[in-house]
Image (spheres, rainbow, N blue to C red):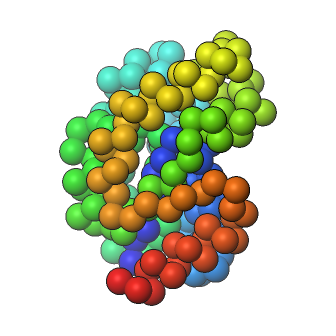
Amino acid sequence: MKITLLGYMGSGKSTIGRFLSKKLNYTFYDLDELIEQKEGQSIPSIFKEKGEVYFRKLENQILKDTLRSDSSFILALGGGTPVFYDSMDFINQYSESFYLSLTPKELSKRLYREKSKRPIISHLNDEELEEFIAKHLFERNPYYSKAKYKVEVKEKEVPEVALNITQILNQR
């Protein structure tokens, strides 16, 4: 079985994915890390040197190559991955997809602590950050809402979210 975790940056995709992979004894992949390994450079460097169009094409190809493999795994997607090309249809065709959902306010609280590590938001103040996230979520919601399952992450610890996911998988 292949499980994909999608949602906005800061929603816990990688953290929950790593935890869940240990519980289920599945391999864990982070799509951003796969991209960085293939290119031999960081995501911000790829954006800066080759542009977003190049990055999105590469991201889509690595996503498809990964999902076409025969092994079982958990894959944490980048926040924008579902938005480009036919990614959501492909994700749903080849995996069990979970949208990890949080409100803009909750996400801004989480991301405030990580602003320096995330170039796209590092220049924003508190009020701008929440507004930026709200706008992005509004734009991405039509794609995120195509996930097979939605898991509310609000005020839940990682083990509880992982348990919710495993319960959903066991009920299907």
Quadrant placement of the C terminus: bottom left
Which of 47 and 99 lies nearest the eye of the viewer? 99
Query: In this orientation, does residue 104 appear?
Result: yes
Residue 116 x, y percent position in the rendering? 74, 24
Look at 37% across and 47% down and name the residue there.
Answer: 144
Residue 70 lies in what quarter of the image? Answer: bottom left
Look at 32% across and 23% down and name the residue there.
Answer: 53
Residue 160 vertical position relative to residue 38 in the rendered view, above or below: below
Which of 67 and 37 lies nearest the eye of the viewer? 67
Residue 54 lies in what quarter of the image? Answer: top left
Residue 75 vertical position relative to residue 81 in the rendered view, above or below: below
Judged from this view, the residue extending furthest toward the right is: 113
Q: 48 left or right of 114?
A: left
Residue 54 vertical position relative to residue 104 in the rendered view, above or below: above
Look at 51% across and 51% down and name the residue there.
Answer: 101
Q: 62 left or right of 22?
A: left
Q: 11 left or right of 73?
A: right
Quadrant placement of the N terminus: bottom left
Residue 48 vertical position relative to residue 160 in the rendered view, above or below: above
Q: How many marks?
A: 0
Residue 51 x, y percent position in the rendering? 40, 18
Which of 45 and 23 lies nearest the eye of the viewer? 23
Residue 57 x, y percent position in the rendering? 30, 34
Judged from this view, the residue extending furthest toward the bottom is: 170
Residue 98 x, y percent position in the rendering? 43, 61
